[in-house]
Image: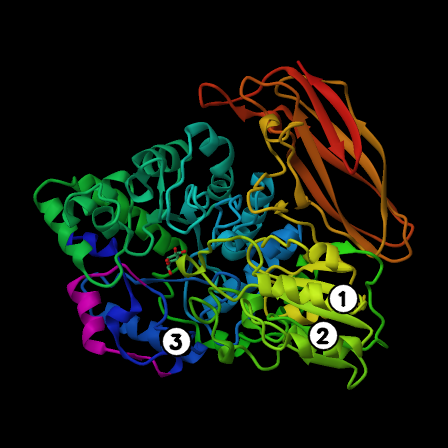
Amino acid sequence: MTVEEKVGQMTQVTIDVVTAGGVGVNHKLDAKKLDDAVLKYHVGSILNVNGEAYTVDHWHEVLNAIQNAVEKSRLKIPVIYGIDSVHGATYTLGSVLFPNAISAAATWNPALVKRSAEISAFQTRASGIPWVFYPVLDIGRQPLWPRMWETYGEDPLLASKMGEAYIEGLQGKDMAARDKVAACVKHYGGYSMPFNGKDRTPAILDERTLRGLVLVPYEAGIKAGGATVMVNSGEISGVPGHANYHLLTEVLKKEWGFRGFTVSDWEDIKRLHTRDRVAATPKEAVRMAVMAGVDMSMVPYDFSFYELLLECVKEGWVPVARIDDAVRRILRVKMQTGLFERPRPDAAMKAQFEQAGFHAANLQAAREALVLLKNNGVLPLSRGKKVLVTGPNADLLSVMNGGWSLTWQGDKEALYPKDKRTIRRAVEAAVAEGSAKYVQGVSWEKELDVAAAVAAAREVDVIVAALGEPAYCETPGNIEDLALPAAQIRLVEQLKRTGKPVVTVLVEGRPRVLRSVTANSDAVLWAGLPGNEGGQAIADILFGVANPSGKLPFSYPRNVNGFTTYDYKPLENTQDNPAGWEFPFGHGLSYTTFAYSDLKVSAPVMARGAGVTVSVTVKNTGARAGQEVVQMYVSDLYRQVSPPNKELKGFEKVALAAGEAKTVEFRLTSKDLAFVGLQNKWMVEPGDYKVAVGGLEGGFALK
Ligand code: BGC
């Protein structure tokens, strides 16, 4: 390969660069621009859509046109197309839109998450695209952050298990298979912890917190075979993600042995100069990023990266060896995805794009993602009831899908499939004809027809108020106040005054502080971002067709200054300064009851390098079948760096018929007790450990 061809492989542009105009189904490619990109600049990759989702047919046209250009080139190296298939093949019309990650995490069911990834991979590859920018393995511990819903929540073990399952689902054993794609683990690392809560603002993280907490799901994702990695768009303690040699090269590539490639995030190499001001010129920014370990640049609007990197190499400012390493990594992934053998979309897959089983899997995922936070007995509702459905999120599909849904912001309601049900439509279908009324009451921020909603409430048996947030993504989702807007809180207050029971459904990407809403609601169902089957799944839970089994994957704050995670440090919860949550991590009610007994730790002492078995019996003591998430927490009573109150060390979701009991076993080894100590290295310390499962406690000593 010539230097030009190599540097081209490292260049990724957005499809706008090769487009003649038009949006979505009207989008047209520009043959001349495409030839320029592929033949003159040798680009290795193209990404994104022009504005909104395409049909499968149009995707095939796009991918075939790109390959036509490739075939005119000297080396005929296929272009790898990348796309944000974030909760399904989100940029293909008619795709299955699954619960987003925060809701997927609420299922605590990695098998469901894996299945959703398999279907997402199928529909993405059926669209001709072999590379997906997902999963997000940033942990979600900053509830203000507008991308919290793209994460699997606050706990590193839960996020790791979900991430592994997702990667397995996307990539399978062989990424070259016709229905598999390469994953992109993002946004490595620490992006999710902006100090002020706004997107793309600084995180302040020390090495110990990074390694012990933030990087844990990433390492799991790399070990699970994650083929590519996207770089943190923000900065950690003054070092922009794209200039972080330590994380990109020392940790990721050297320590963890990552052999895939890293891709920058959108325009972020340029931003080392224009925004972060760590590089005095655009050229220095290119050199800095490449030398830090970025292998491909999502430039994405021009070929400046290509030109500047070429100059750097020719002037000896960037060694050819670094370019060779980057290109080798990129070509390896192209080989692994089978692109050299089958560079074109598989025409036969078009007819298989739509499958009934896909929608059934989505409905199951959505049902299990719903978390019943409060229920004073009003739920499940009987179908004979008269219901008022109200609130800003009652009659929209976009709000249940959030960003990365058919468009970047996900807010184009008209693009959503007409056969999917909003909450309003699903409730209407569940009750006798004419028994459900709908009055919106308020928008997200403003009162509309509250008086009409209150009047309607007086005529019914029960009120379902669907509150929450609009669809949003990234910086446009920044907020100044975590509280639910006052208009929504007041709506529930006024509905409550009618004396009719209020069931609040929260459709939101992050835990908006509820103020009086909890007290004024007889039941609260957290729906998060449940996807296109969300409306149906919510009705199924409300009317008892399905039994709720979701559990919160984050701590729901009670106050806007109360961001305390479940694994808080002793300092965070003292007599003078008590921690408090609206609803704790791991919480979620069922329509049946479960009782725990016989917690046993197999030995009182664990030797270093060995393990113990923790077993517990869980019984369904209620009258209907249900699923329970058995959660095992371990507390290290003393350690050289202040220990968390407790840490999740195992979980299992079990299905139990009424009256049925099962014994669940967890294996706990001394490795599971490791933490990052004073020397910033993983270590274990002898001492006493407490084990807690379902309100029971046990313990052992590590010798
Ligand atoms: C986002 C990434 C995304 C990329 C490509 C960026 O703005 O931060 O998550 O993969 O755009 O669309």
Left or right, 97 with reference to 542: left
Left or right, 45 with reference to 512: left
The question of residue 36 being in magenta is answered with yes
- For label 1, the residue is 497
Residue 218 location (% of width, % of height):
47, 41
Q: How is the image coloured?
A: rainbow
> Mark 3 packing: few (<14 Cα in 10 Å), some, or many (20+)?
many
Q: Which residues are magenta?
A: 26-46
Quote the CA–CA distance across marks 1 and 2.
Answer: 9 Å
Residue 534 location (% of width, % of height):
64, 68
- For label 2, the residue is 454
Residue 151 location (% of width, % of height):
52, 51
Front disc: 3 or 1: 1
Q: Is residue 54 above or below residue 309?
A: below
At 46% from the left and 23% from the top, the residue drawn is 681
* SS at circle 1: loop
